[in-house]
Amino acid sequence: QKSVSRIVTKNLWKKLLAWFGDRALADFDGPPGYVLAFSFVEAEQERGVKFVTITKHLKALRVVLLEAERRGAIAKVASWPKLPFDGEPRTRYLTREEYAAVRAKAYPRLRLWLDICLYTAMHTSDVDALRWGDIDLPNGLWLRRNSKNKRQCRPAWFPMPTALRAALVEAHAELVAPPGREELIVGPVSFRYPIKNICKALGIELFAPIDLRRTLATWWIEGGGPRDALKAWMGHVRTSFISERHYIKATAPMLASGIKALESPEVNP
C-alpha cells in the first residue's frame, strides 16, 4: 500500500479513474488488459501528451494491478506497452556561487533541507523522512536509505561532507530539547514558491530538487572525485553509466583540467 500511494498521487488517481473508472478489475486480466492499456496510450497520444508522461501514468496503473494480482483479484497482469522516450533530459545544475546565493536567501528550514538534498544526493522523499536517529553527529556519519532502489540498495553509513555536518550541528544546537531518534530532522518543506522567488530575485535559472543531485555529481567530478565512488554516493547499484549520462555535466573547470592534462609534459612528445 505504501508503494502504491507513493506512485499514485491524488491527481493521477483522478485521471486514471476518469479513463478506467467504469472498468472492473477483471477487465484487466490477461491480454484484454493490454488492449485497454494500449487504447489509453493511443488516446493520450492523440491529445498531444508526451510518451514520458504516458509512461508515468501506465506505471501507476500497473502498480495498482500488480497489487490486485497479489491479492488474487485478477489472475495475471498482461505484458505492458513499451513506449519510446521523447522527453529531453534535464541539464540544470547550480554553480557553487549560485548555490551560496540561493542558500543565503532561503529560510532556515529550507536552507537545511537544501543542504541535505545537495550533499547526500538523496531523493526528496528520503530527505523528508530523514530522522535524527539516521545521523551520527559525533562521528560525522549519515545513514543512506534509497526508496527507489530499496531491494538492491541496503542502508549504509556514509561520511558527512564538512558543510553538511556544520549545518546539522547548528540545527541541533538550536533545538530547545534533545530530539528523539524518530523525530524528523526537517520533514517536508515549502520549496516551489520560495525557490521561484529567490531565483527571480537573483536573476538565475529556476531549478528543481532533482537538479541538486546533478549539482552534487558535477561538483564531485570537478573536484577530482572518483567516478566509481560517485556511483555509490548517488545510490546507483548497478553501473556508473547512469551517473555519467544523466547527472554529470561538462563544466569549465572540468574542461580546463582536461586541457591541462593534454598539455602535461608526460603525455606530449
Image (cartoon, rainbow, N blue to C red):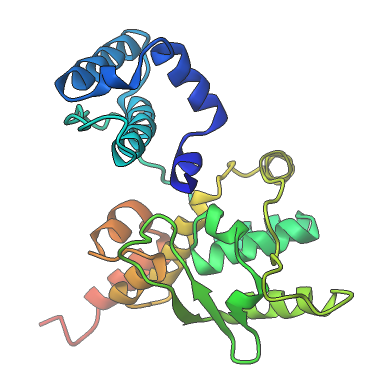
Q: Residue at x 38, y 77 (%)?
A: 225
Q: Can you give x and y, in whole percent of width and height, for residue 145 in the image? A: 47, 67
Q: Can you give x and y, in whole percent of width and height, for residue 265 in the image? A: 20, 86
Q: Residue at x 36, y 13 (%)?
A: 23
Residue 187 visible in the current orientation: yes
Q: Which residue is situated farthest in the bottom direction here? A: 139
Q: In which image quadrant can residue 154 be found?
A: bottom left
Q: Residue at x 35, y 72 (%)?
A: 232
Quadrant (top left, top right, bottom left, bottom right) of the C terminus: bottom left
- Is 98 positioned to the left or the right of 68 in the image? right
Q: In which image quadrant can residue 74 be found?
A: top left
Quick check: 199 above or below 73?
Answer: below
Nearer to me, 157 or 230: 157
Quick check: 202 above or below 137?
Answer: above
Nearer to me, 80 or 223: 80
Quick check: 129 above or below 33?
Answer: below
Q: Can you give x and y, in whole percent of width and height, for residue 184 in the image? A: 69, 65
Q: Which residue is situated farthest in the front direction here? A: 72
Q: Residue at x 38, y 28 (%)?
A: 57
